Structures are given as structure tokens and as C-alpha cells.
Image: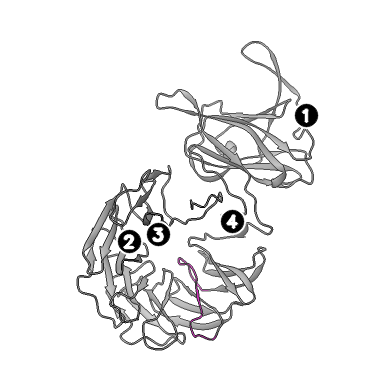
Amino acid sequence: MKRFLLFYIISGHLLLADDVTLWISSADDNSVAVSMVAQEEIYGFQMMFGVDGGPENIFAPVDSIFYNEAGDSVSSTVVYALSGAVLDFGYTCFINAEGLVVALSFDNMGIAPGDTVVLAELPWMVPGVSPDQVNIIDPIFVGLDENGVPVSLEVEYGLVEYQDGWPYETIAQVISSPTVAPFESGNKVLFGDYNGYFRIVNPDGSDVCWFDTGNQIWGSPAVSDIDGNGDLEIIITSKSQHLYILDDDCGLELDFDAEQYLMGTPAIGNLDDDPEKEIVFGGYTNPGTIFAINHDGSPVDNFPLELDEKIQRGVALADFNGNGKDDIVCGTDDEHLYLIYDDGTIADGFPFEASGDFRSAPIVIDVNGTKVIFAGSRDNSFYALNSDGSLLFEIQTGDDVPSSAGILETDSGPAVFFGSEDDFIYGVDLDGNPLPGWPVDTGVDVIGSPVFADLDGDGSPE
């Protein structure tokens, strides 16, 4: 069976609950589907559905009589789910005369917590309806406490409102973030998948073009006018060991064979004296090389540089020595963080050595004229380094820190946020002190980088 990944552009937003989050994920003439993210095991639930402008009786006629504990007759019928977790965990679904859906397991089976799943796809009789017309009404979910006593779970529910033409469906995972680029022909969405296909998609979800790189794409596309001709180029890396430069119609401008797996997002900067930009990326095959190339594929002076250490993720670029050229910061699978100057020399005090691999791209910020390096490691720690390689601070977490940090400007100065596979998102100041109210327990591994936006329009980013 093929596994499908759905890539969403969401015009509304979904509230995240401590226990269960619900939304209508599909609706057509024959069925309605409810999806969920659950942080707790579920042992039963009930909810009602409403359809804007639709009939009151949306399910099959009730034709069965049951009796409750008080001996009162209850009209209900069994509805057979078409798909979803209710089938996977052996639940029976009932619908009464008022349209209340009740689901439970006669074997006392719990529905396991986890990432997004279809809870139940139910047959109904509502032609010509779309998901934005369907409402979830008064859901109740039941779990068990540590003593096995039933408890009511916290539920948030609403509607995911998709832009027209979305979600976009592929037949392979998309494990890196998409890029949105403002080409002369208009804004486009760019991303690569695990089958090695790079895609350009219009804002309405229609395809512009695709390009086969020949192997898995782990990194995000980079976009920049590298050669200074006024047109944006797209730079992508692939496990096929090739870096490609494409135009906005997937036309090939450069095919660079690195002879090493290329897994990270390429970085774009200025490492020499010419006005054109350079592309910097690392190899994930021995001898673990740092590449710096021009638009035509020619190497920058003193590169490539063999570190003899594999580099899985992207690099950071910043001018550390004040000569107007970008220097390179990268992490390796040999538990090292490097600062490499634009001339290919390794800075004094580096490499910094941790006790676990660095599998995320470092970030660099300027603090009062001084550069500070931030990076998470697979030794359960998040590190901040001074430009001389000395440790500014270390935040110990309960598990690996697999993704890059995010920096948010606040009234009291820059704040650093990062996630760990211990389920927490951490927020600290530039001295490593925890921010008030942080860390926050998400209930699931945090494997992506944080982003910030003012979702509710109150002037403060979330």
C-alpha cells in the first residue's frame, strides 16, 4: 500500500489542546471524516455533527432500540465506519435519533496517542457538502488516569480551512521545509521529496514543473540571485551526490557532482572579492568535505576543504573576522563544531567538541558586535559558543536536540527557542537563563525548528 504525505497550506489555524485536537478532514456526498491528534490514550468518545444549510438527519435512519441503566428505551443504530482508528482498534460506533455519535470498545481497547490520524470516516446522506460546511458539536473524550479511573480529556475542535487547491499530495515523504520564492512570474512553493523529486507549485496548488534528482532530498531549496543577473536561481542538494541549480521553470543551469551524499540545505553568501555569490554545503560521505563553489561550479579559492568528518546538515555563514567576507560554521558526526574562515583555515579554538553528533544546522547571531554560535547535539544538550570557541552556556535537556534554534526579538532583547526529543520547547535569554514560563511540554518529540507569527493579531508573536 502506498503511503501518502499531505503538504498543507492553511488559511485558518488549529488550536492545539493538551489531550485531543479534532477537525473535519474531509466531506463528500457519501462520507464525512474526523481527524485528530491525541496526546492521551482514548477509551471512548461522543460528538454530534452539524451541516450549515444542510438537513437535520444526516445519517441513516435509526432502527434499533436499546435500554439504558434506568430501563428507559433508547433508539440507536450501529454505523459502520469506512476507515479510521475506530476500525484499527475495534471500536463500535452508534448513532441515536438526535444524531449523537458514540464510539466505544467492548473489549476495553484504548486508541493509542500519536500524530495526525483519521479518527473515523462515517457514511452519511448529505450530497454536495464541503468540509467547511461541517461542524463538530460538543465532543466528549474519555481516558483513564493512573489508577484506571475514567476521566474526561481536554478537547479542542474546529475546522482546518484549506486554500483552494490544497493540500498538495505526493507519494513520498517531504522531510524538509518548503520554500516560498517571489519569482518574476509570481510567488511559488518549492520543495523536494524522499523519492528525489523537486517540485515547483503555484499558490493555487497547480504544478509548475518537477525535476528528478535521482535520490532522496533531505534539505530545503535555497533561492538567490547568485550570478547577479536579476533572476532568482534555485539551489537543491540530493543524496544522489549532486547539487543542482535550476531556474523557475526547472531548467537546469548547473549539475555539480560532489561524489558525496549531500543532505543539508545549501547556504548562499560571499566568500571572495567578486560581486557574485557563492554556494556552501557539506558532504555526508567520507572524507567529509566542505564545498564552496561559484554559479558555474568552479571552486572558491582554498576549497573544497576535507575535514574527514561527515556533515549531515546545512552550514551557517557570517563574517567573524571583520574582513567583509563570510566564514563558515558547521557541525559534524564526529561531535565537532567548526568555524572555518573564508580562506579555508580553521579558526583558533576550534573545533569545539561535544559528546554527541551535531545533526542540525547551527545558527549565528550578533550580540553587541560579537558573534555567538548556537547548535543542538545528540548528547541531549544545546550549546552556545563564543567566537573564540569557548563555551558561553550549555542547556541540558532530556533527549537529543535534532533541529536548529529560532531567534525572536523581544522587548528585553533576543530570545532563543529550540526543541528537544524530550517533548519540551525551551526558551532562554542570551545568558542561557530560562524565560518565564519555559520550557513548555508539548507531549510529543520536538523534531522541527520553531517559527514565530502573530496569529491572533494582538501585536505579540506566538
* Residue that mark 4 sits on: 8
Is 354 part of what is drawn in magenta?
Answer: no
Query: x%, y% of residue 36?
Result: 56, 42
> Disc 4 to disc 1, how far (Cα)?
36 Å
Mark 1 or mark 2, which has the lower sequence index? Answer: 1
> Disc 4 to disc 3, how far (Cα)?
24 Å
Q: Quadrant of residue 166?
A: bottom right
- The type of residue carrying mark 2 is Ala
Helix, strand or loop status at disc 1 = loop
Is 215 part of what is drawn in magenta?
Answer: yes
Which numbered tag is attached to residue 61? 1
Q: Which residue is at a point 72% across and 44% down the rendered structure image?
A: 133
Give whichever of 427, 204 is nearer the camera: 427
Front position among marks 2 and 3: 3
Q: Contact (CB < 8 A) between labels 2 and 3?
A: no
Secondary structure mostly seen in the magenta stretch: loop
Residue span colored magenta? 213-229
- The type of residue carrying mark 1 is Pro
* Residue that mark 3 sits on: 407
- Image position of 77 with respect to 8: above or below: above
- Relative placement, left or right, of 66 versus 314 is right
Q: Residue furthest top?
A: 71
Query: x%, y% of residue 163?
Result: 66, 56
Q: Which residue is at a point 25% across and 56% down the rendered structure image?
A: 393
Q: Residue furthest front?
A: 411
- The type of residue carrying mark 4 is Tyr
User: What is the crowding at mark 4: few (fewer than 14 residues within 10 Å), some, or many (at least 20)?
Assistant: few
* Residue that mark 2 sits on: 375
Front position among marks 4 and 3: 3
> Disc 2 to disc 3, how far (Cα)?
12 Å
